[in-house]
């Protein structure tokens, strides 16, 4: 298919597709003439994935580049994809030491995660984000420790196990589902809060 058809099927303007091509986010098409190429359903799927990750998932292009590199790796392992996605989703988060009490919050979060028995990397951005949230809660006057996250951890673990059991084998679909289900969880939590406040 021509780039105009790729644009139509992929749901992205031709200029955006050309940008994806220049940035290496989209593999080149099969050359058919000096300034023309033929694109396939693989390109349509990739354009849709990029658009979804930027619009609904709100990932930056640099984060998407990282995720796509992992997706394109030969036989990516689910754990490796999870680690890359975790890093991509929290890349722009402020470090926990930007708020007073960040070091203490990190120690509490480390102990909390150890108590849960979760196998997460020590330099995981999600771990840093959790510590940042704890430090910020304390900074704003709520005298809590990491155990305040226990109900969230229980719900997250249940959801993660359910998601893991239903993950597709194809890496791109795996990543897309992970991002979109995370967005859905955040939306549902806010909707539930709105409902609770109306009671």
Image: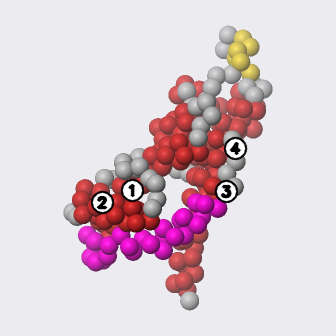
Disc 1 residue crowd, few under 14, some 14–19, many 20+, Cα 10 Å: many
Q: Specify the farthest residue to the top.
A: 34
Task: Count residues near mark 4 (Cα–Cα under 10 Å), then give few for <14, some for 14-19, many for 20+.
Answer: few
Category of crowding for the residue at label 2, using alpha-carbon neighbours closer than 10 angstroms: few (below 14), some (14–19), many (at least 20): many
Say which mark, if any, is on residue 18. Answer: none
Q: Report, in whole angstroms, how far the alpha carbon at label 2 lies from the one at label 4.
A: 35 Å
Tell me which residue sits at (66%, 14%) in the image: 35
Q: Earlier in the sequence, mark 4 or mark 1?
A: 1
Q: Is residue 29 left or right of residue 65?
A: right
Q: Residues within 10 Å of mark 3 (few under 14, many from 20)?
A: few
**Label of residue 169 in the image:** 4
* Relative vertical location of residue 35 with respect to residue 18 in this rendering, above or below: above
Mark 1, residue position = 127
Secondary structure of the residue carrying tag 1 is helix
Q: CA distance from mark 4 to mark 1?
A: 27 Å
The residue labelled by disc 3 is: 165
Residue sitting at x 59%, y 45%: 78
Q: Secondary structure at mark 2?
A: helix
Residues at marks 2 and 1 touching, judged by CB atoms closer than 8 Å = yes
Q: Determine the image quadrant of residue 102.
A: bottom left
Residue of label 2: 106
Asked whether residue 109 appears in the rendered view, the answer is: no
The stretch drawn in magenta includes residue 166: no
In magenta segment, residue 156: yes
Q: Can residue 193 be spotted in the picture?
A: yes
Q: Is residue 123 above or below residue 136?
A: above
Numbered range of the magenta stretch: 138-162
The disc, 2 or 4, on the residue closer to the chain's N-terminal end is 2
Distance, label 3 to label 2, CA atoms, is 31 Å
Where residue 48 appears, as percent x and y from the top left, is: 67, 41
Query: The C terminus appears in which quarter of the rendering?
Result: bottom right
Image x and y of residue 160, in percent: 58, 60
């Amino acid at each position: 298919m021509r780039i105009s058809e790729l644009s139509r099927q992929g749901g992205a303007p031709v200029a955006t597709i050309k940008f994806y091509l220049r940035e290496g986010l989209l593999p080149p098409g099969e050359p058919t003439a000096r300034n023309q190429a033929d694109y396939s359903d693989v390109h349509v799927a990739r354009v849709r994935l990029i658009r979804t990750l930027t619009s609904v998932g709100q990932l930056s292009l640099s984060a998407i580049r990282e995720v796509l590199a992992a997706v394109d790796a030969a036989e990516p392992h689910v754990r490796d994809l999870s680690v890359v996605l975790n890093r991509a989703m929290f890349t722009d988060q402020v470090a926990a030491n930007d708020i007073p009490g960040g070091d203490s919050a990190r120690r509490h979060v480390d102990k909390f995660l150890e108590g849960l028995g979760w196998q997460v990397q020590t330099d995981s951005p999600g771990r840093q984000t959790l510590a940042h949230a704890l430090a910020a809660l304390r900074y704003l006057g709520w005298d809590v420790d990491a155990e305040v996250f226990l109900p969230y951890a229980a719900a997250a673990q249940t959801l993660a196990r359910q998601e893991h059991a239903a993950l597709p084998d194809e890496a791109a679909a795996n990543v897309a589902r992970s991002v979109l289900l995370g967005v859905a969880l955040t939306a549902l939590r806010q909707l539930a809060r709105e409902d609770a406040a109306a009671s």
